[in-house]
């Protein structure tokens, strides 16, 4: 790209960035344009807080789905985040590089296994286990949380590993030279230095968990009901959209796009919270 | 009560070791489960013959071709866009409110369910732009879908290149682009490749968005304007509609092997590139 | 680096240009109902053997996609299996090509053999929630239904009448998954297309009538719904040929052998 010159390169890159961002903006606007008018005309409070979802009768209340999405995602993070980060730290700091070189590609391989395969395994292996051991219909919050938690592991692990590895070795050497143990160095120097990457990994994982559709439809049972226990069957926001979109027309269809708007808002709130927690911690140090 | 550092280290190592073991065990179990159920039907004949009777019998050749084409289109569009954006945001702009807003937007879109991308693709590419159900519509939709992931991971990778590298390059008289090209990108490459591989994984594994945009035709695609069915969609339809569990697992096994091959190739290329640059 | 990029780009362009030409065969796209999709694929394959000049592609997506794509001309033929077509589809020409019985199914381990329409209604409304109330074992009932808007569910609810589905009901997104769920859960009850009954599940008699092709054809079995093909205006040319083939003796024979009910 030498013929472009420094200024030309800058312009090309700006163009690329601009088109990528406007493409993403286009999608966000598309969802909002299709969904927001419905929320306003139906009444935001009735839409968000009513728990009657009967599209055929013109009733569109998504409170049960909001609760379900929150529970399933939290459950998935509870399973995926600690396991994933611990795994990444252990693999980078306590395992020889050569072993790592085998394990990391294996884990990335798992990121490519389609969510429908995870979902199908949930139906064939996990749900019957829950049904026979713990009771209930088996297709439940618990099954959804475990399957999603496992599904996001590869994402969390591989991005965390990259960010931990990119911490310069001089940091570690400095700490070790001061007499810190290997674990103290990891805990007090390496992991904090890689924090922004680890949090990005967790956020990407969380985004995948909230946004996952097919696997959740397969294992969560999809009943429109506020869950009382982890063994209850639930329907998440994404499942609501995907289940009915193929058949929805008119107002029903708008209501599903409105569900998409709500999902977008929830993700924005979660991301802001995560962003705030990073900045707060950074401020303390 | 404080434990001596040595014991803390031991305890921490033990806990993390167990977590790692558990994680690996789960993941290995999944792979083995799929391979064990799927490999018995897999063979060259399964791979290279046409499906019969809606996939109940026969092989999955058109599906394999469809998957590869669709993923290639998605990656060919999303990688330059994503990496370019990440370079622009990290190297050519100062950290400001605008870059933060963009990053925030990308994070939010990463969590949007793929079905919404699918609907967007269906209305925008398939209907408005009249591309029909085609590999091109599907690939464009998937490219949009994986763009946030690629931007974010590339950005992280580029940001983690120490500033001292850049300073040395500048002090030798290199321009910004030369620095990016010769210093920053090579050291950020592993992270970028991880991002792209995650994108490949997501496009191969996607079902909902693909059904709406690339369709689910079981015929061999002859051009990018043809409809195609990917392996995930094929697996989904076979398993969920109860057409054939054996062939479903066979498809899943091939899927796992394909991803393995793609990953190995990417790693091989990357290692050669890194070796050449040192 | 940039040379390789240029080569890549020109290859892409070449492929795209190739994509433009080479399509001389007349193309008919069918899209919509996932329930009818497998049958449509089979019929399309047979049709193309006889008419090599016409290329028929079949896509899924659901009945709403069928209506939408027929309206926007993305597909020449939309497939919908709704008992009543929605307002938007009023301007499309609908041709009924098949009928489909809906069977009430339970787990093979369940000893209940038959239910009345009233019992079915109360089970799905959650009034009856234990199998012993309808002559089975003392076990809770797991109701499994389809998503709102599904052709099967809409038809089921309209024919049975007065259904407001129990909140606890599991929702599955296709006939196949209803079958899998009922096959895996000993307490489950669901309903699905009559063509998809197999040995993993057990259909029950409805008001004493078994769900078989014969009973559906002679009109004794209650739960039946139509499958429509939707076109803009009267079908012409290749589109007409495809629809005519499906309505021909051979097409209807295939429909019958696949487990659907012929209209002729």
Image: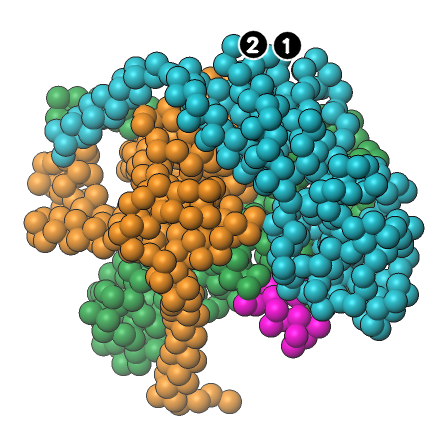
Find residue C146 and report its horizontal and vertical position in percent: 71, 46
Is the C-beta separation of discs 1 and 2 under 8 Å? yes
Residue nearest the observer in this picture, B201 or B154: B201
Q: Which residue is mark 1?
A: C233
Q: Which residue is mark 2?
A: C236
The answer to whether residue A129 is magenta is yes
Task: Classify mark 2: helix, strand or loop.
Answer: loop
- Colour chain A is painted in: green
Cα–Cα gap, marks 1 and 2: 9 Å
What span is in magenta? A125-143
Left or right: residue A183 compared with residue C263: left
- Colour chain B is painted in: orange
Which residue is drawn at the image coordinates 57% and 35% (left, top)? C254
Residue nearest the observer in this picture, B57 or C77: B57
The answer to whether residue B37 is magenta is no
Give the total number of marks visible in the rendering.
2
């Amino acid at each position: 790209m030498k013929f472009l010159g420094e200024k030309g390169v800058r312009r090309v890159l700006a163009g690329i960035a601009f088109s990528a961002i406007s493409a993403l903006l286009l999608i966000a606007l598309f969802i909002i344009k299709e969904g927001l008018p419905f929320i306003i005309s139906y009444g935001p409070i009735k839409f968000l807080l009513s728990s009657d979802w009967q599209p055929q009768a013109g009733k569109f209340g998504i409170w049960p789905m909001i609760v379900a999405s929150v529970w399933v995602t939290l459950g998935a993070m509870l399973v995926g985040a600690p396991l994933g980060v611990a795994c990444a730290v252990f693999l980078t700091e306590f395992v020889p590089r050569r072993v790592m070189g085998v394990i990391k590609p294996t884990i990335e391989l798992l990121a490519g296994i389609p969510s429908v395969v995870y979902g199908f395994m949930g139906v064939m292996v996990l749900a019957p286990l829950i049904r026979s051991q713990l009771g209930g219909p088996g297709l439940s919050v618990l099954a959804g949380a475990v399957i999603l938690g496992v599904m996001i592991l590869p994402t969390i692990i591989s991005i965390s590993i990259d960010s931990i590895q990119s911490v310069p070795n001089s940091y570690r050497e400095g700490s070790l030279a001061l007499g810190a143990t290997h674990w103290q160095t990891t805990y007090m120097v390496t992991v904090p230095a890689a924090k922004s990457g680890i949090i990005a990994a967790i956020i990407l994982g969380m985004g995948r968990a909230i946004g996952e559709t097919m696997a959740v439809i397969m294992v969560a049972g999809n009943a429109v009901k506020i869950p009382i226990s982890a063994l209850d069957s639930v329907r998440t926001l994404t499942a609501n959209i995907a289940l009915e979109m193929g058949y929805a027309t008119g107002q029903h269809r708008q209501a599903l796009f409105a569900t998409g708007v709500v999902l977008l808002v929830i993700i924005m709130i979660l991301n802001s919270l995560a962003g705030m927690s990073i900045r707060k911690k950074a401020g303390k140090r | 009560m404080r434990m001596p550092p040595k014991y803390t280290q031991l305890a921490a190592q033990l806990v993390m070791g167990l977590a790692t073991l558990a994680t690996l065990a789960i993941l290995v179990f999944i792979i083995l489960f799929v391979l064990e159920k799927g490999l018995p039907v897999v063979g060259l004949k399964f791979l290279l013959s046409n499906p019969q009777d809606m996939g109940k019998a026969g092989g999955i050749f058109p599906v394999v071709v469809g998957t590869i084409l669709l993923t290639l289109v998605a990656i060919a569009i999303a990688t330059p866009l994503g990496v370019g954006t990440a370079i622009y945001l990290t190297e050519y702009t100062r950290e400001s409110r605008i870059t933060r807003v963009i990053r925030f937007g990308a994070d939010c879109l990463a969590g949007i369910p793929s079905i919404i991308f699918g609907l967007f693709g269906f209305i925008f590419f398939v209907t408005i732009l009249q591309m029909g159900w085609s590999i091109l519509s599907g690939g464009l939709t998937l490219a949009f879908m994986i763009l946030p992931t690629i931007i974010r991971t590339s950005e992280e990778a580029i940001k983690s290149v120490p500033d001292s590298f850049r300073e040395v390059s500048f002090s030798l008289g290199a321009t910004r682009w030369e620095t990016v090209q010769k210093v920053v990108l090579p050291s950020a490459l592993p992270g970028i490749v991880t991002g792209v591989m995650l994108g490949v994984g997501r496009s191969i594994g996607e079902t909902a968005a693909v059904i709406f945009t690339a369709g689910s035709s079981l015929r061999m695609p002859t051009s990018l304007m043809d409809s195609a069915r990917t392996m995930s969609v094929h697996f989904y339809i076979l398993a969920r509609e109860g057409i054939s569990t054996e062939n479903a697992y066979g498809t899943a096994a091939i899927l796992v092997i394909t991803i393995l091959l793609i990953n190995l190739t990417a790693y091989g290329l990357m290692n050669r590139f890194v070796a050449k640059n040192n | 680096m940039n040379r390789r990029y240029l080569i890549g780009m020109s290859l892409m362009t070449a492929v795209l240009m190739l994509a433009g030409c080479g399509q001389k065969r007349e193309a008919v796209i069918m899209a919509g109902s996932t329930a009818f999709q497998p049958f449509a694929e089979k019929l399309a394959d047979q049709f193309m053997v006889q008419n090599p000049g016409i290329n028929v592609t079949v896509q899924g997506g659901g009945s709403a996609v069928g209506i939408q794509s027929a309206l926007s001309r993305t597909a020449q033929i939309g497939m919908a299996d709704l008992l009543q077509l929605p307002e938007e589809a009023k301007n499309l020409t609908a041709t009924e090509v098949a009928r489909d019985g809906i069977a009430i199914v339970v787990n093979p381990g369940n000893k209940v053999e038959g239910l009345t329409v009233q019992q079915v209604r109360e089970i799905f409304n959650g009034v009856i929630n234990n199998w012993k109330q309808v002559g089975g074992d003392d076990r809770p009932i797991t109701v499994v239904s389809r998503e709102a808007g599904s052709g099967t569910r809409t038809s089921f609810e309209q024919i049975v009448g007065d259904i407001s589905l129990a909140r606890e009901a599991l929702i599955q997104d296709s006939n196949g998954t209803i079958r899998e769920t009922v096959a895996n859960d000993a307490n489950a009850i669901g309903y699905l297309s009559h063509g998809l009954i197999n040995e993993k599940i057990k259909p029950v008699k409805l008001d004493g009538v078994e769900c078989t092709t014969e009973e559906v054809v002679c009109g004794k079995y209650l739960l039946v719904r139509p499958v429509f093909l939707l076109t803009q205006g009267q079908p012409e040319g290749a589109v007409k040929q495809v629809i005519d083939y499906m309505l021909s003796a051979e097409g209807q024979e295939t429909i019958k052998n696949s487990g659907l009910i012929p209209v002729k």
